[in-house]
Image (cartoon, helix red, strand yellow):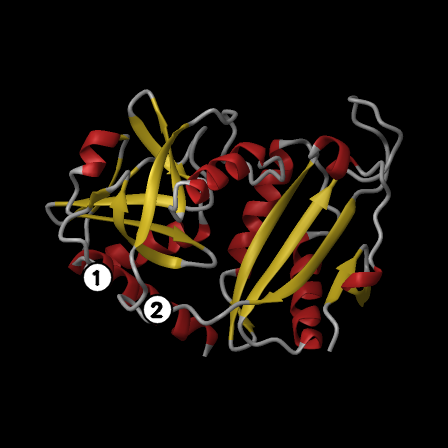
Amino acid sequence: MSELIWLNGQVMPLSDARIGVEDRGYQFADGVYEVVRFYGGKLFTLTQHMDRLERSAAGISLPMALPKSELIDQINRFLPRTGLKEGMIYLQMTRGCSPRNHAFPECKGTLLFYARELPPVPEPGAAPGLTLISVLDERWSRCWIKSIALLPNVLAKNAAIARGADEAVFVLDGNVSECCASNFFAVSRGKVLTHPVGPKVLPGITRMVLLEVAKQVGVEVVERPVSEAEALAADEVFITSTTRELAWVKTWNGRMIGRGECGPVTLRLHQAFAQRVKAETR
């Protein structure tokens, strides 16, 4: 079966999809996006992702292309047509196609989404540990918006790849904010430390669920700025994202974190998160 895409209300093969060269997403990165995981053909936290999409759109004065309830319905109708069971939905919404001008145009926006297959997430504690590097945080101050303008993140990711690492950690004024495609957490003396959501930290949906399950299993989470030195000395470090769930970190800037293994707090939280996923997608 060929890959399918939903584009402005029409479902077609992905290879047949066309968007004008003057689409503002292409020329200005004038748009927002979401990535939603599905397990066994069932979407996880779809409503929460669409809530964030709505907030991101409002953050750039972009009208929603469809009412949120209708968009949720269209995605739920689309997924079974793909035949996929494990994967993600990528959704992008831009201000649409119009003659190039910095001023907002009066035009119809572009909305699209498609599904991609992903391998099942490894069982908690089973995946190899990640390697991180630090990079200077040179991004804008509206990182709470899930903008398609991701060039600083792309450059950071490729800086990590060039040094044989998996992910890059943004550091500004000595404090860790987040990674280029994930939220960041350190564990010190049994407490989980993470930077609050705000100008430099995206309100991750996996992050949100993690905070909920941490409370349920009795793990204390402290939201405050965390210095790079404090984080490097932590007992455990892990990152969260829609596609990775919770992923433990083995080394950072060539330095081993803790004992170089998935720590007990990270494992406990990932097990609780996995149970949440199973409960909501069974």
Q: Residue furthest left?
A: 189
Cα–Cα gap, marks 2 and 1: 13 Å
| Quadrant of the rendering where the N terminus is positioned | bottom right
Side of 182 relative to 101 (left or right): left
Between 103 and 115, the one nearer to me in the picture:
115
Image coords of residue 79 (percent x, y): 66, 71
- For label 1, count other residues whose C-alpha is less than 10 Å away and answer few (under 14), some (14-19) or many (20+): few
Residue at the spot 76% in from the left edge and 61% down from the top edge: 6
Image coords of residue 101 (percent x, y): 83, 23
Image coords of residue 251 (percent x, y): 25, 47
- For label 2, count other residues whose C-alpha is less than 10 Å away and answer few (under 14), some (14-19) or many (20+): some
Dot placed on the residue nearer the N-terminal end, 2 or 1: 1
The residue under label 2 is which amino acid type? Answer: Ala
Between 252 and 23, the one nearer to me in the picture:
252
| In front: label 2 or label 1 | 2
Q: Is residue 116 visible?
A: yes
Q: Is residue 50 visible?
A: no
Side of 59 relative to 210 (left or right): right
Residue at the spot 20% in from the left edge and 30% down from the top edge: 229
Q: Secondary structure at mark 1?
A: helix
Pointer 1: what residue?
A: 217
Q: Is residue 93 above or below residue 89?
A: above
Pointer 2: what residue?
A: 274
Q: Secondary structure at mark 2?
A: helix
Q: Is residue 141 above or below residue 189?
A: above
Residue at the spot 60% in from the left edge and 32% down from the top edge: 59
| Quadrant of the rendering where the C terminus is positioned | bottom left
Image coords of residue 93 (percent x, y): 70, 46
The residue under label 1 is which amino acid type? Answer: Val
Residue at the spot 40% in from the left edge and 40% down from the top edge: 168
Q: Residue furthest right?
A: 99
